[in-house]
Image (spheres, rainbow, N blue to C red):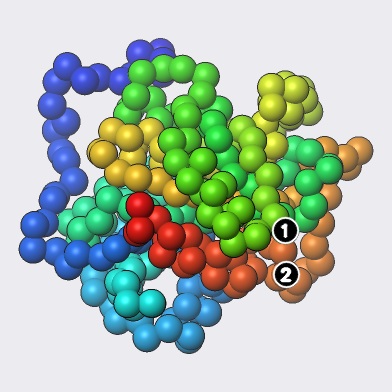
Amino acid sequence: MITDTFDNKSEAIINPCINEDAPAVDACILTFSHRIEKFVLENYDCKQIASFWFATGETPVYLFEYKGKKFAFYKTYVGAPACVGTVEDSLSIIKTNKYVVFGGAGCLNKEIAHGKVMVPTEAYRDEGTSYHYMPASDYVIVKNSDIVAKFMETYGIPYVKGKTWTTDSFYRETVNNFKKHKEDGCISVEMECASLQAMCSFRGLNLYTFFTSGDLLDAPKWDTRHKPGEFTGTQHDTGHFDIALELACFVTEI
């Protein structure tokens, strides 16, 4: 069974390569949004330093400076296996132990406004990737949630903390599962958090993550809460990159 997958008794057949000559950066920032990637390239002096290559094509990795600090940046993939894989591959092209990851998430509580920042405290493991990095459990604790929350408070950014539900199948977010996770304290649903935290804990990396409150499941009928072509308050809202960048600066001082 998948709950028996974690194996810390034998070596992995392949491992990510650690490159000691890779450029050191203060943190690495990941987005899922093509629109935010375009915004960053147009508004910051980005230099491409490497690429990930998958069957789907090239994923460029960029370096830019802000407030005297060096940051790596790239657009990652939706879904746990590919997203986790890019972080592990990044170990061969940059040197850092700090990863800031932000993106959209479905909202399980109608009281949480569209576009509000959500800080996950624990992630329900309704996916597969995390079971390769840690023993089976219902939840993985998001270790740096208090640090992310402290940043939000310091900068006066409205936010809400709570558990998240990490799933592999957004078309199988059923009514009963929604009710179960909401009753258990989950405020969001997404596809990467549990896996990212499990992998980061396994590799000795620090994950700092937050979500944008997007579509609403807590309604008589699924509500996208935005119109086509509308970006404010969505996962493509460039203002959330500004939050991620300031968070990256904040955690470099820790």
- Answer yes or no: is residue 22 visible: yes
Q: Residue furthest front?
A: 154
**Residue 6 locus on image (x, y percent):** 31, 20
Q: Quadrant of the N terminus?
A: top left
Three-letter residue code for mark 2:
Thr
**Residue 132 locus on image (x, y percent):** 33, 27
Q: Residue furthest right?
A: 220
For label 1, count other residues whose C-alpha is less than 10 Å away and answer few (under 14), some (14-19) or many (20+).
Answer: many
Q: Is residue 148 above or below residue 199?
A: below
Q: Is residue 6 above or below residue 77?
A: above
Per the image, label 2 sits on a secondary structure element best described as: loop
Q: Are marks 1 and 2 in contact (CB under 8 Å)?
A: yes
Q: Residue furthest left?
A: 21
Q: Is residue 161 above or below residue 9?
A: below
Q: Is residue 214 left or right of residue 86?
A: right
Three-letter residue code for mark 1:
Gly
Per the image, label 1 sits on a secondary structure element best described as: loop
Residue at 59% x, 62% y is 155
Q: Which quarter of the figure has residue 25? A: bottom left
Residue at 41% x, 17% y is 136
Report the residue marked by disc 1: 115
Residue at 47% x, 27% y is 140
Please state which of residues 9 and 117 is positioned toward the viewer in this rendering.
Answer: 117
Q: Which quarter of the figure has residue 33? A: bottom right
Report the residue marked by disc 2: 232
Label whose residue precedes the other's in the sequence (1 or 2) = 1
Q: Is residue 220 left or right of residue 83?
A: right
- Answer yes or no: is residue 105 visible: no
Q: Is residue 227 left or right of residue 4?
A: right
Please state which of residues 156 and 170 is positioned toward the viewer in this rendering.
Answer: 156
Residue at 67% x, 31% y is 186
